Image (spheres, helix red, strand yellow):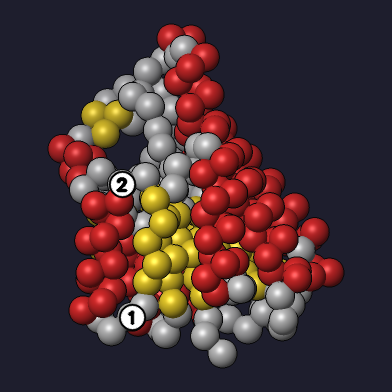
């Protein structure tokens, strides 16, 4: 049976690398994200690797766009085996008291409400397909465990993802739907590369931090996706070994 995976934020970084890893493992991968050109680049890399993709430009901060995405998945394949809720945004770091309501809401709409809506649509598909069931993987981030300074919207949404992951894992049992979360720390992508120049620390200093290859994340996501539905990784932390998280920072 052809296994179908959907990756949000598949146009770059962790999403692109994870989509390619799933393709290498034999999945057909639906590529969702806001930028068609970036998704097409991922699709081209997938084609070169011998995989099959479907590009669906999607804004996960918009409920109608999410509904259209899943309608196209259902119409094209009639099933969904894996959803990787990866897409997320952040706003410029600033003191909590200086954040605007608009900045707060934009992060909540994408990082939390968008994941909820994608999860809801995935469950509707997975519980009605034959065979019933599937797997949902959420990108929680290290920020689901420990905040950085001046990161209230991002940290709040990622902490909330942990609750959503556990609720989905519980509520999905009766439909043979597994749900787990991967918390990622310092994967090297174009967006995170600036961390190598220095990152604000809790003590007010600015220090460089160690990074890890994004492919290490992609392999971890592919491993979670490869498990039989009788087994689940509820939470996995994959981080640069020397990043300042464990201990006193």
The quadrant in which residue 50 appears is bottom left
Residue 88: image location, x then y, percent:
44, 43
On the picture, is 41 further left or further right than 2? left
The quadrant in which residue 28 appears is bottom left
Secondary structure of the residue carrying tag 1 is loop
Residue 83: image location, x then y, percent:
55, 63
Residue at x 50% of width, y 22% of height: 104
On the rendered image, what quadrant is the N terminus found in? bottom right
Residue linked to disc 2: 35
User: Can you name the residue that lies furthest to the bottom here?
Assistant: 1
How dense is the environment of label 2, judged by Cα within 10 Å: few (below 14), some, or many (20 and up)?
some
Secondary structure of the residue carrying tag 2 is loop
Q: Looking at the image, is 164 positioned above or below residue 231?
A: above
Choose between 210 and 121: the one closer to the eye: 121
On the rendered image, what quadrant is the C terminus found in? top left
Residue linked to disc 1: 51
Q: How many marks?
A: 2
Residue 52: image location, x then y, percent:
36, 78
Q: Looking at the image, is 219 positioned above or below residue 147?
A: below
Residue at x 67% of width, y 79% of height: 229
On the picture, is 42 further left or further right than 113? left
On the picture, is 206 further left or further right than 225? left
Choose between 124 and 113: the one closer to the eye: 124
Residue 214 visible in the current orientation: no
């Amino acid at each position: 049976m052809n296994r179908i995976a959907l990756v949000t934020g598949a146009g770059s970084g962790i999403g692109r690398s994870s989509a390619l890893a799933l393709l290498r493992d034999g999945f057909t991968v639906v590529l969702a994200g806001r930028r068609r050109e970036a998704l097409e680049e991922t699709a081209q890399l997938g084609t070169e690797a011998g995989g099959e993709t479907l590009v669906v430009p999607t804004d996960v901060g918009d409920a109608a766009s999410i509904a259209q995405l899943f309608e196209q998945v259902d119409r094209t394949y009639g099933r969904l085996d894996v959803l990787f809720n990866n897409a997320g945004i952040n706003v410029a770091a600033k003191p909590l008291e200086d954040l605007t309501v608009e900045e707060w809401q934009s992060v909540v709409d994408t990082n939390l409400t968008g994941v909820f809506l994608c999860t809801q649509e995935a469950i509707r598909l997975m519980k009605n397909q034959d065979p019933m069931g599937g797997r949902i993987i959420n990108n929680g981030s290290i920020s689901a465990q420990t905040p950085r300074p001046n990161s209230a919207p991002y940290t709040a949404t990622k902490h909330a993802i942990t609750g959503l992951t556990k609720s989905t894992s519980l509520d999905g049992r009766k439909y043979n739907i597994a749900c787990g979360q991967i918390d990622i720390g310092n994967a090297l992508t174009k967006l995170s590369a600036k961390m190598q120049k220095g990152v604000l620390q809790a003590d007010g200093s600015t220090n460089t931090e160690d990074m890890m290859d994004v492919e290490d994340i992609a392999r971890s996501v592919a491993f979670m996706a490869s498990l039989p539905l009788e087994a689940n990784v509820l939470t996995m932390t994959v981080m640069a070994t020397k990043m300042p998280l464990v201990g006193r920072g």
